[in-house]
Image: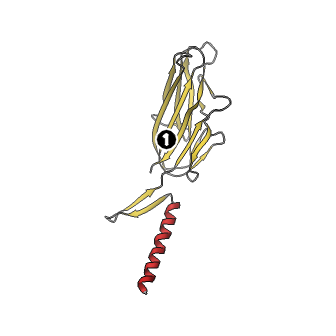
Amino acid sequence: MLHKKIFRVLVFILCVGFVQKGFAQEVAVINNKGTIQNIIKPTVAEIYCASPATSQVINEGAFSDINFGTAGIVDTDDYTIGASANQITIETVGRYEIIYRVTAENNVNSRTGCEFYLEVRGSEANGTRAYTYTRNNLVNRNTVTVSKIVDLSTVPAIVKVKGQVYNSSQTATSATATITNNGASLIIKRIK
């Protein structure tokens, strides 16, 4: 009789533990050596450029935010998306993998170079600057993809992608390039 009561209590504790684990962001377990290990639940946020009515144009000589425009999968416990989907705000301390991809195109018959970088908390993230180059309007698209691991000990942290035309043979007063529809995304994954 006593064994049944103890067994029921243990089963109840085990079930409650599994229910709580399903909702937890981080779970502590003890391995077979008696060491406590923290296991996190990976989370993700994605914004991307779908097919807006008007494609985004970036200008020469001034960095501007890349406006992705569409929120994809977003785990709202760890992330929030800006109103125009041009930024992701990380709300939880941790280690994150951040990946951005941008395709720029040139719709005039000239050589055009664009540069992009990842901005975290208002500053350029080291090692994230990337460049595209298009020669003419026949071979007019080029893509950059950058991956960065960041440790965030203070939050919130706003993450954006910035871009500009850095040089061009366009004869207009200010050279431009266009962000290709379905050609840009920003993905953040919590990895620790």
Looking at the image, which residue sits at the far top? Answer: 171
Looking at the image, which residue sits at the far right? Answer: 53
Q: Is residue 123 left or right of residue 29?
A: right
Looking at the image, which residue is at 57% across and 26% down? 164
Q: Position of residue 41 (x, y in %)?
A: 48, 55
Residue where numbered disc 1 is placed: 98
Whether residue 11 is visible here, answered yes or no, is: yes
Q: Position of residue 133 (x, y in %)?
A: 50, 21
The quadrant holding residue 107 is top right
Q: Is residue 46 left or right of residue 34?
A: right
Looking at the image, which residue is at 42% across and 59% down? 38
The quadrant holding residue 160 is top right
Instruction: Count residues near mark 1 (Cα–Cα under 10 Å), then give few for <14, some for 14-19, many for 20+.
Output: many
Total of numbered circles in the picture?
Answer: 1
Q: Position of residue 118 (x, y in %)?
A: 52, 35
Whether residue 156 is visible here, answered yes or no, is: no
Foreground residue among 25 and 122: 25
Quarter placement of the N terminus: bottom left
Q: Position of residue 65 (x, y in %)?
A: 60, 33
Looking at the image, which residue is at 47% across and 58% down? 26
| Residue type marked 1 | Ile
Looking at the image, which residue sits at the far left? Answer: 33
Q: How is the image coloured?
A: secondary structure
SS at circle 1: strand
Q: Is residue 98 left or right of residue 59?
A: left
Residue 112, above or below 80: above
